């Protein structure tokens, strides 16, 4: 979260007053007496928030804004112009060159802090959006045939969350902020794919039991990937939710999932929601070995999995939202032959047993012998072999503020 503020003013008294105000509010203050000095400090230091006077010698506030916008800065710099001019024409001029906000002189310290907090929220959103998009695309790049899977899962997830939020039980848990967070972070459910070898992830033939175990490690790899970011930004709720989803979206309500076999409300609510959205997309998307299931067929499979694979309350929310799901699927359907790799191997096994199976990410063929081999291998549920990439610090009892009560 940006906390360093650059104060730019040729009046040393104004600079000191502003610096004292922002420091009392918990910001770090950096001072510059004109635009030239300010621009150099922006280049040399990690500065993302700027409060600058409009009228200054040498480079004024407008010129500073323009130069910041023309630069190839690594991140967005939020600029607030401090001015005694308050005409519409002047505000338009300031916005045109790149100012984000204005404070009129004489200023009140409380207003300065409030506007800086707005800027900090804007920068936090920019950082969050960029991180999520980049990570999701990194995972997606491992499989060139994912189609619009990420977009569909996002929309299905949001639909389920909005429906659950109507119930008294979830009203205080699934807030508008929660819905926004789960929409943003659901694309990261398979970020752990980056740690699965290509020869397994992209294999066109049947998976051996050993390869199947490699596929089942991706929730642990994804969680560990996000854990490092969480430790650096412990206040970032979106990272905590992304971690929960990546780690637990293959767990099942009855405890038969992986990687830890946790059950019921031990599974984070966000992961229970994404699990259903992910399976629905796997069922209703055309595969290399099958046509897409109809909405009715997919709904029956999901309903049959209530209390087994899925949280019954999430299934009920899905039942109430089926028309919305159908419309979203039509709007976001892939052209040609998509080949999403979510939920394929075990799903095909369990469908043959007329129940929803483990969601497994692998590009497999429809070879029935392959699915039978994997069904036998998983029926015994042997413990996962040790990871080639260690994942220290992950235990079955994963705390989360996103679990339902």
Image (cartoon, rainbow, N blue to C red):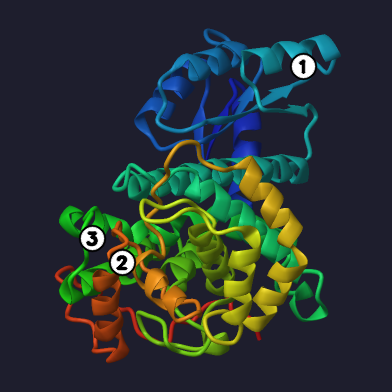
On the image, numbered disc 1 is attached to which residue?
91
- Determine the secondary structure under disc 2: helix
Give the alpha-carbon distance from disc 2 to disc 1, as whole Å: 51 Å
> Residue at left 31%, top 81%?
375
Tell me if residue 141 comes above or below residue 263 in the rendering: above
Tell me if residue 157 comes above or below residue 66 in the rendering: below
User: Where does residue 175 sit, x and y in percent of width and height?
Assistant: 73, 65
Give the alpha-carbon distance from disc 2 to disc 3, as whole Å: 7 Å
Q: Quadrant of the C terminus?
A: bottom right
Q: Are marks 2 and 3 in contact (CB under 8 Å)?
A: yes
> Residue at left 60%, top 44%?
120
On the image, numbered disc 3 is attached to which residue?
196
User: Where does residue 145 sit, x and y in percent of width and height?
Assistant: 36, 44
On the image, numbered disc 2 is attached to which residue?
218
> Residue at left 41%, top 38%?
46
User: Where does residue 286 sit, x and y in percent of width and height?
Assistant: 47, 51
Sequence-earlier tag: 1 or 3: 1
Sequence-earlier tag: 2 or 1: 1
User: Is residue 161 among the parts visible in the rendering?
Assistant: yes
Q: Residue 157 — which label?
A: none
Taking depth in this image into account, of 278 and 348 the one nearest to the observer is: 348
- Determine the secondary structure under disc 3: loop
What residue occupies the far right of the structure in this picture?
Answer: 87
């Amino acid at each position: 979260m940006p906390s360093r503020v650059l104060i730019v003013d040729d009046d040393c008294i104004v600079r000191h007053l502003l610096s004292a105000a922002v420091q009392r509010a918990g910001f770090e203050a950096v001072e510059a007496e004109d635009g030239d000095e300010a621009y150099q400090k922006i280049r040399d230091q990690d500065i993302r928030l700027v409060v600058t006077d409009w009228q200054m010698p040498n480079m004024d506030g407008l010129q500073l804004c323009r130069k910041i916008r023309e630069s190839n800065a690594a991140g967005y710099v939020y600029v607030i112009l401090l001015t005694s001019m308050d005409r519409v024409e002047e505000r338009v001029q300031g916005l045109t060159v790149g100012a984000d906000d204005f404070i009129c002189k004489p200023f009140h310290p409380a207003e300065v802090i409030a506007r800086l907090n707005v800027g900090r929220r804007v920068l936090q959103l920019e950082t969050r959006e960029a991180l999520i998009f980049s990570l999701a695309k990194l995972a997606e790049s491992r499989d060139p045939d994912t189609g619009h899977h990420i977009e569909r899962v996002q929309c299905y997830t949001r639909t389920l969350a909005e429906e659950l939020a109507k119930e008294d039980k979830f009203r205080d848990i699934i807030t508008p902020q929660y819905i926004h967070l789960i929409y943003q972070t659901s694309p990261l459910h398979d970020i752990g794919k980056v740690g699965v070898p290509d020869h397994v992830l992209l294999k066109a033939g049947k998976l051996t039991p050993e390869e199947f175990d490699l596929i089942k490690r991706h929730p642990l790899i994804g969680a560990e990937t996000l854990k490092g970011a969480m430790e650096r930004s412990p206040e970032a709720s979106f990272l905590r939710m992304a971690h929960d989803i990546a780690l637990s979206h293959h767990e099942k309500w009855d405890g038969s999932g992986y990687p830890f076999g946790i059950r019921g409300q031990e599974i984070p609510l966000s992961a229970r929601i994404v699990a259903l959205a992910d399976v629905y997309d796997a069922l209703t998307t055309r595969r290399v070995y099958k046509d897409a299931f109809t909405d009715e067929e997919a709904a029956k499979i999901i309903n049959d999995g209530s209390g087994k694979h899925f949280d019954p309350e999430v299934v009920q929310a899905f039942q109430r939202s089926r028309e919305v799901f159908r419309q979203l699927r039509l709007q976001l359907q892939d052209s040609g032959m998509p080949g999403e790799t979510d939920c394929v191997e075990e799903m095909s096994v369990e469908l043959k047993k007329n129940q929803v199976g483990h969601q497994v990410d692998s590009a497999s063929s429809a070879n029935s012998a392959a699915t039978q081999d994997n069904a036998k291998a998983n029926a015994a549920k042997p413990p996962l072999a040790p990871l080639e990439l260690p994942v220290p610090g992950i235990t079955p009892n994963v705390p989360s503020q996103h679990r339902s009560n």
